[in-house]
Image (tube, grey):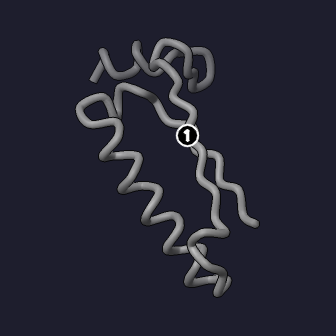
């Protein structure tokens, strides 16, 4: 049973978290089903939302990086 853990910056999906998670989950599940031949009911997808201020690239948080763009 494949288990997929997706960590995502919560601000990326803030406009429609339920819809975006459903879309991502469907695409990931479809890819695994295609590659393995398993049923979609055998694929587990879990989302972990992380605030941009808590996600770092090197020594700078994503919130700061985005504010510079």
Which residue is painted at 43% across and 63% down in the image? 26
Which residue is painted at 51% across and 64% down in the image? 28
Residue 42 vertical position relative to residue 21 in the rendered view, above or below: below
Residue 67 vertical position relative to residue 3 in the rendered view, above or below: above
Q: Quadrant of the N terminus?
A: bottom right
Quadrant position of residue 62: top left
Which residue is painted at 60% across and 69% down in the image? 41
Question: Would you say 14 lies left or right of 52 here?
Answer: left
> For mark 1, what is the residue?
47
- What is the x, y in percent for residue 11? 35, 25
SS of the residue under disc 1: strand
- What is the x, y in percent for residue 53? 48, 12
Spot the residue most to the front.
41
Question: Would you say 19 lies left or right of 7 here?
Answer: left
> How many numbered dots are placed on residues in this image?
1
Q: Nearer the viewer, residue 51 or 61?
A: 51
Quadrant position of residue 44: bottom right
- What is the x, y in percent for residue 49? 51, 29
Q: Quadrant of the C terminus?
A: top left
Spot the residue most to the left.
15
Question: Would you say 46 lies left or right of 3 here?
Answer: left
Q: Nearer the viewer, residue 57 or 15?
A: 15
Which residue is painted at 35% across and 33% down in the image? 12
Residue 59 vertical position relative to residue 11 in the rendered view, above or below: above
Spot the residue most to the bottom.
37
Spot the residue most to the right.
1
């Amino acid at each position: 049973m494949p288990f997929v853990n997706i960590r995502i910056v919560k601000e990326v999906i803030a406009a429609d978290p339920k819809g975006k998670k459903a879309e991502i989950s469907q695409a990931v599940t479809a890819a695994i089903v295609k590659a393995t031949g398993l049923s979609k009911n055998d694929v587990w997808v879990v989302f972990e939302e992380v605030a941009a201020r808590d996600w770092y690239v090197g020594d700078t948080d994503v919130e700061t990086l985005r504010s510079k763009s």
